[in-house]
Amino acid sequence: MAGTGNRFAASCSETADNLSGYLEDDLAFPRRRRVGRHLRRCIRCQSLLDSLAWTVEQLRTLGASEHRLPSLTDEVIERIRREAARRPS
C-alpha cells in the first residue's frame, strides 16, 4: 500500500517477506530499519504484522497448554514409590 517513494523504506512485498524476522528481532539492523520505516507508513502491512503476532502468540499458548497431565497410571506408580520410600528396610 505504501508507495512512499522513500528509497530507505521497504516495499510491501519486501516487508511481507521479512515480517517473521522483524517480529522475532532476527533481522540485520539495516533491513529491520527499512521494514520498520515501511510499517510506520503502511496500515495494511502493520495489520499483517499484528495478525502474525497474534497467531504466533496463540500457537505459543497452545503449545504451553498441551503439557501432558499425569495419567492415573502415573499417579499410582508415583504413590507406590512414595510409600515404598517411607517403609523401613
Image: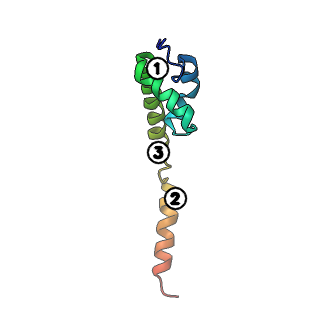
Position of 46 with respect to 35 (left or right) is left
Picture coordinates of residue 13, whole percent (x, y): 57, 17
Q: Which amino acid is tagged 1?
A: Cys
Viewer-nearest of discs 2 and 3: 3
How crowded pointer 2 is (Cα within 10 Å; few <14, some 14-19, many 20+) is rated as: few
Q: What is the C-alpha distance between the residues marked 1 and 2? A: 49 Å
Provide the residue designation for mark 1: 45
Q: Residue at x 54, y 18 (%)?
A: 11
Q: Residue at x 47, y 60 (%)?
A: 75
Viewer-nearest of discs 1 and 3: 1
Provide the residue designation for mark 2: 74
How crowded pointer 1 is (Cα within 10 Å; few <14, some 14-19, many 20+) is rated as: many
Residue 64 image label:
3
Q: Which amino acid is tagged 3?
A: Ala
What kind of colouring is applied to the model shown?
rainbow
Picture coordinates of residue 53, whole percent (x, y): 45, 31
Picture coordinates of residue 78, whole percent (x, y): 49, 66
Tell me if residue 18 comes above or below residue 25 in the rendering: above
Dot 2 or dot 3, earlier in sequence: 3
